[in-house]
Image: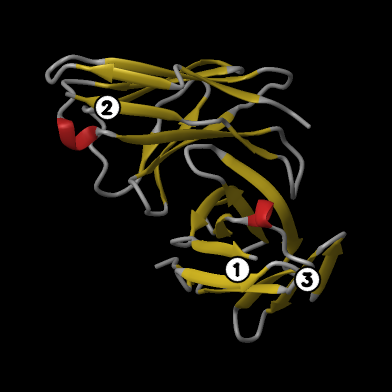
């Protein structure tokens, strides 16, 4: 079945880069997404990448997609304390591109 | 971007009662909406796909008689938790598809349900 896996925790120093990794199983996923969730809040879409792309950059965010290995990563440059949150990787399901399968989430902690 | 609103944001109900959560697309029409559930410190699990004008499609393991979904209009889907029990306490979040491709899926702010 469809499955998305992420490491659960990442700690970085303020100003350093953060790299959050994700692996997925459904090779037919059309889109892959990164969402951010702050405590007690809903989901904020950070960025997404179409499956025929290798890389997408949006300001401090860089998404890399290795479709062969089914590996997705999110790099946050110059990480700030405000970036502390849970980051979810999600793939669009084979049952429909708007039906998302989420990973367990990576808790990013940024310390001075 | 498009806005999806959920109401209530927080609700406390007694065991055995039912509670309704609304998901509205405020500035677009959505023929399809999705309901997810998130337990504390866990991921979002898709519960069901809500289709305007037809029955919802439930994911495996989700009790359709307990989690009633009604998608009566192109801008509103409701999730009713019937005969709620403490184990139903969770964060429920919906999403709606504006149409098109890519970044056209918008999530609501979520609803915290506590059953006491």
Subunit under mark 1: A
Q: Is residue A56 left or right of residue B7?
A: right
Name the quarter where the N terminus of chain A is drawn: bottom left
In front here: B41 or A67? B41
In front here: A35 or B52? A35
Q: How is the image coloured?
A: secondary structure
Disc 1 to disc 3, C-alpha distance: 11 Å
Can you say whether A42 is above or below B2 in the image?
below
Residue ranking furthest to the front: A112
Can I make out residue B86 in this image? yes
Which residue carries the number 2 mark? B114
Q: Residue at x 26, y 33 (%)?
A: B89
Disc 3 to disc 2, C-alpha distance: 42 Å
The residue tagged with tag 1: helix, strand or loop?
A: loop
Whether label 3 touches label 2, CB < 8 Å: no
Q: Quadrant of residue B80?
A: top left
Which residue carries the number 1 mark? A28
Query: Looking at the picture, how far across and down is residue B55, in whole percent?
Result: 40, 27
Which residue carries the number 3 mark? A52
Number of other residues with Cα within 10 Å of mark 1, as a class: few under 14, some 14 to 19, many 20 or more: few
The residue tagged with tag 3: helix, strand or loop?
A: loop
Name the quarter where the C terminus of chain A is drawn: bottom right
Residue ranking furthest to the bottom: A69
Can I make out residue A26 in this image? no
Query: Looking at the picture, how far across and down is residue B81, in whole percent?
Result: 27, 23
Q: Nearer the viewer, mark 2 or mark 1?
A: 2
Task: Compare marks 1 and 3 and give the one earlier in the sequence.
Answer: 1
Do the residues at discs 2 and 1 belong to one chain? no
The residue tagged with tag 2: helix, strand or loop?
A: strand
Can you say whether B103 is above or below A8 in the image?
above
């Amino acid at each position: 079945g469809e499955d998305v896996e992420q490491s659960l925790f990442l700690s970085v120093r303020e100003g350093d880069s953060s790299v959050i990794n994700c692996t997925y199983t459904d090779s037919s996923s059309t889109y892959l997404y990164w969402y951010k969730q702050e405590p007690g809040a809903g989901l904020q879409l950070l960025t997404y990448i179409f499956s025929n792309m290798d890389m997408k950059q949006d300001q401090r965010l860089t998404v890399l997609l290795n479709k062969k290995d089914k590996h997705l990563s999110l790099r946050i440059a110059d990480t700030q304390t405000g970036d502390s949150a849970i980051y979810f990787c999600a793939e669009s399901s084979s049952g429909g591109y708007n039906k998302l399968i989420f990973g367990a989430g990576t808790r990013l902690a940024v310390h001075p | 971007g498009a806005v999806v609103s959920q109401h209530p944001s927080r609700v406390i109900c007694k065991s055995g009662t039912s509670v309704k959560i609304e998901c509205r697309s405020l500035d677009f029409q959505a023929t399809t909406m999705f309901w997810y559930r998130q337990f504390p410190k866990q991921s979002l699990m898709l519960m069901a796909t809500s289709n305007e004008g037809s029955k919802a499609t439930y994911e495996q393991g989700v009790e359709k008689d307990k989690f009633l979904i009604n998608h009566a209009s192109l801008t509103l889907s409701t999730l009713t938790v019937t005969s709620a029990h403490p184990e139903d306490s969770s964060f429920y979040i919906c999403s709606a598809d504006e149409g098109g491709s890519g970044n056209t899926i918008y999530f609501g702010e979520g609803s915290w349900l506590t059953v006491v």
